[in-house]
Amino acid sequence: MNEIGLFDVNFDTGECYWSFELKRMLGVRHDVPAEFHLLLQRVHPDDRRAFCRTAMQPLRADCPRHSSIEFRVVNDDGRVQWLHTERRAIVRKDGSKDVVRIVGFVLEIGAPAGLSRAA
């Protein structure tokens, strides 16, 4: 089942939103709050370094406005699933480069070319 999940992180308010579909892709109950450490626990150990490098971009002054990454998540039952994420950084309107929010979507995909889905 290919689904699209949505996320929204507001650095000013601390609010973090994951859609019902995203929580389902991550194997998280719908009533569990969206938290980065929970997401990181789901990311496949071999993909965590690259995932963290991309996830931390909004904290740097040279943050690209758009970013994408493909990574695996491991569900509680051991099932491995590939996801593709596109995110957009939103900066302050005062002309600074401070990222105040990131929004984006996550799409279930097959394994990228040349990689086994079971990897």
Image: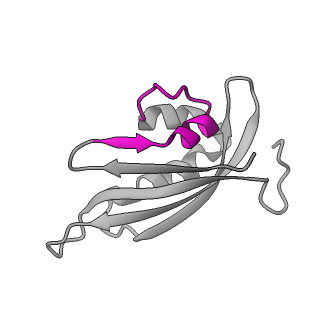
- What residue appears at the point 18 percent right and 71 percent down from the top-left corner? 93
Q: Nearer the viewer, residue 48 or 2?
A: 2
**Where residue 113 sits in the image (x, y, percent)?**
82, 63
- Residue 44: x %, y % from top left: 65, 39
Q: How is the image coloured?
A: one colour
Q: Residue at x 58, y 44 (%)?
A: 48
Is residue 105 shown left or right of residue 95?
A: right
Considering every residue shown, the one lying at the far bottom of the view is 95
| Image quarter hosting the C terminus | top right
Residue 65: x, y in percent?
40, 71
Q: How many marks?
A: 0
Query: Residue drawn at (37%, 57%), measured in percent from left and top?
Result: 102
**Residue 72, quarter of the rendered image:** top right
Find the magenta span and give its range.
15-34
Q: In front: 24, or 111?
A: 24
**Residue 79 relative to residue 60: left or right:** right
- Residue at horizontal 43%, vertical 38%? 36
> Which quadrant of the figure contains the N terminus?
top right
Q: Is residue 25 magenta?
A: yes
In the image as oriented, which residue stretches furthest toward the left?
A: 94
Q: Is residue 48 above or below residue 64?
A: above
The x, y position of residue 26, in whole percent, is 60, 36
Reply yes or no: does residue 19 show up in magenta.
yes
